Image: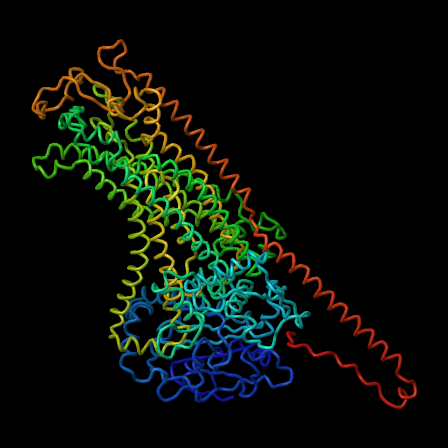
Amino acid sequence: MERQDVGEEQVGSFTQHDRAEKPGSPPLACEHSGSPQQEEPTIMRRNDHYLPVPGEEKSLDGDFANTNNRSNVSIPLKNLYAEDGSPLHQRLGPYFSDGRRRVDYVLAYHIQKPSSIRRQSSRFGDNNFVRRLRRSLSMRSSRAPLQPKEDPEIAAQEHRTDYHEDDKRFRREEFEENLLETGLEVEKDEGSKIPGIGFLKIHAPWNVLCREAEFMKLKMPTKKVYEVKQGSNVVEKIRLFIHKVTAPLHPKIDANRPQSVKSLSHPFSREKQHLFDLSDRDKFFDSKTRSSIVYEVLKRTRCTRAKYSMGITSLLANGVYTSAYPLHDGDIEGVNAEPNDRKLLYDEWASYSVFYKYQPIGLIRKYFGEKVGLYFAWLGVYTQMLIPAAIVGVIVFLYGCATVDDNIPSMEICDPRNNITMCPLCDRACSYWKLVTACGTARASHLFDNPATVFFSIFMALWAVLFMEHWKRRQMRLNYTWDLTGFGEEEEDHNRAEYEFRVMQKRMRQEQSTPKEEKVKLTCTDRMLAYLTTVVMMCFMIAVTFAIVFGVILYRISIKAALHMSSYPAARSNIRATVKTTAAIINLIVIIILDEIYAAIARWLTTLEVPKTDKSFEERLIFKTFILKFVNAFTPIVYLAFFRGRLVGRPGNYLYVVGSYRMEECAHAGCLMELCIQLCITMLGKQLIQNNLFEIGIPKLKKLLRQRKSELDSKEQEELNKSMLRHEKDHILGPFVGLSPEYMEMIIQFGMVTLFVASFPLAPLFALLNNIIEIRLDAKKFVMELRRPIAAKAQDIGIWYNLLRGLSKVAVIVNAFVISFTSDFIPRLVYQYMYSPDGTMHGFVNHTLSYFNVSDFQPGTDPLQPMHLGYKVEVCRYKDYREPPGSSSQYELSKEFWAILAARLAFVIVFQNVVMLMSDFVDWLIPDIPKDISLQMHKEKILMVELFMKEEQGKRLAARDNHAQDNYTSPSSANHSPPQPRSRPVSHANCS
């Protein structure tokens, strides 16, 4: 066998049959020893290029495994590259060097070349910009320069590093050999345009795809098709009419057109392959299915060179491989970009110009898998359901704007003829003030605190139930369309690398005391320290959140006193607005910073617990992250809604904290306006800064820094991108970290929309505008900036549905308390129907204010400037229901207070039970499974039974005909002529 030295590049292609030809040789061709004629055998081993013998390929997948009737000879491809460095046989797209076999999966790893070798790649040629790229990228990917050999300490350290790298290489060799034994085909590329990175490209031939599809029980479409009916004739006509009207809103994708027929699906079986349409093998298993099949093989393949068995997850965790990912279909930009699903998704989904269109959910599922498809389908349903909520919220807000001039309490506050003198808002620095100065706050509060907000709270509670029911029906429809109705979590959930490592350590400690037959596993006792750490750290983090909120309270108290003492008129003109806004902004900044810290702490705590499987790890991580982020986001809001203004005391007997800090009280119109400001700033700030700005700005900043470090101008960078292969381009993209951050972002937003919607009716509108941008932003991120994720099957959105349902239940209780205790809705009703002399709201403001004799101030708390208003004040007013001075029980809570408290508690009980009852009724009224889907699922079962009955009948008829033919054969003819063998029917595709 000849070898051709083509420089520093290497592309080695291997199959199981190459190994079978040389049982005594190492498993991988790149490890074959060089011939005696080669001066540098190490380099020559890296330069081997093996491709199948020309003319043996039969299809795109190649039937490379079926080699019984041909020679298993791999020959070197001498002219692999042209003079300009471009591969002669390289086909555009994710293929092997022969341009025929598709790359289904890629493993990347660090390579370490001897420092004495100084060769330039023949593929790159002498391009100046490529040399500059290598020099710039080497700063990030290669080792530090070699130190002088005179230093024995450094020489020993280098020896240990080389030993570690050799150990990794030996593990890779064993793992790749085991991959070949499973039937996969691999090709190495250690001469890529990314210095220091080697790639192992994996291809699954047809027989492996068939075998694994049968093991995984993948449902594949059969030849049998049937008509899909959406319901009765009237329903069908309405559906077609709506589809025709909304035609401009549908993306230009065939999969989104109304489907009148559907293929009958059945778990793939090699024995029943005649049921499936195998006329085009290349398209029978799409790229998503192929990569998921290879991933299952990778998870099942073990490497036993270490003291414990290592799978692909362990190899990745130990740095044997640095990354593993399937490839994108192709490029999305450029003149030479071939049509592919990725480009179609970019044009019809990831572009801001199509923000008004529906999402191509079918194509998203086809390209990214069911799990990602369900997330975007849920996000689309949530965004659609926000439209009516936003419309009603805007109507409620406009109602408040229209009735603000007719609101009697705000008119009384703004009337200067009332001449009501209020008690000081703080000790010493603050003086007496006129109620008329709170006119602006009172009018603004009416925009959100009006009778319509009660209706809106009931509406949003029912809206949450309708949203959950609508999503359940939509989810069931998608399960039927995507053939997931019979899908279960039957696949084996493989152990995580950290768990296997801990089990190995425990086994080594117990080798003498534990029998070998006994299975070693981690128990609760082994994890007890981690559990205690988790509980302590979670409590500590929650306490930190409370402490920070308390710090913001002290800031508000102190800055209010400082502004009152200021000599600048501008600072004293609008103290309340300044304090509210700055405190809300501080809370927002703290929330954003703590969110990032809490996410890292939650992951660290989950890692300490060493969950056994990835599913368990994800659920524990979600639970911890949700608790920490929920407490972080809603603690300031809960304080404003339910605690501020209630732990104050009264003039002459105020409540103090940390020495001389007097607890703050609400404005006369209540704390609802401050709650609204906090919600508005927190919601808009999180969406604009944390969600959108971080997701857009940080990736662009990283890309800009990479371009500046590469020392290439725009033309050279563009030329380099054109020359890079698909697996090299995808390696530069960011890794896919899962859907948990995306879900968490939306769950917190759902809490903002539902929990305190009584105080902020515009929350659904802001959420709707954010989600319209968020969908396209996430789409662009998935299509352009992230590696392609593994296609994972899922029937539902998992634990997130339970969190949504829990939030919708809690929202009813929270809104009941907000209406009852935070707003003035109940005091107004009580006054109008119990204390008003004429049944109107006239006199309500005076009814809510109590009297205080200024001579009863505690020493050192009276105002420094008592004549601030120009006259001596003897009695001031404050908002509370207390007995007047001079009475037998002065300053004690009055009977009006207890009557209003009873009414508030009664309202909470009635509101909660009525809304819960209505929600349960709506839940019962709407079936989880649409009727037409239920009928179609029943029809599928009947058709499947008929299909197998016809198959059995066909087999019996064929057996009867063969038996009759044997009976009619004459004995004489049988004696004079040899018996003719009966021919077996040839199947459409041989998977064996």
Give x and y (percent) for residue 895. 33, 16
> Measured from the top left, where is residue 855 in percent x and y?
15, 15
Q: From the top left corner, tell me how far across and down residue 882 is, in percent.
A: 27, 18
Q: From the viewer's perspective, is 202 left or right of 544?
A: right
Whether residue 604 appears in this view of the structure is no
Q: Quadrant of the C terminus?
A: bottom right
Whether residue 482 is visible: yes
Q: What residue lies at 42% left-to-right and 42% top-to-bottom?
A: 534
Colour treatment of the image: rainbow
Q: Is residue 838 left or right of residue 322?
A: left
Vertical order, 860 against 185 (above or below): above
Residue 105: x percent and y percent?
48, 70
Please tell me which residue lies in front, 869 or 113: 869
Residue for point 36% across, 51% down? 768
Residue that sits furthest to the bottom in the current view: 976
Observer-nearest of 514 and 685: 685
Whether residue 362 is situated above or below residue 42 in the rendered picture: above
617 or 94, which is in the foreground? 94
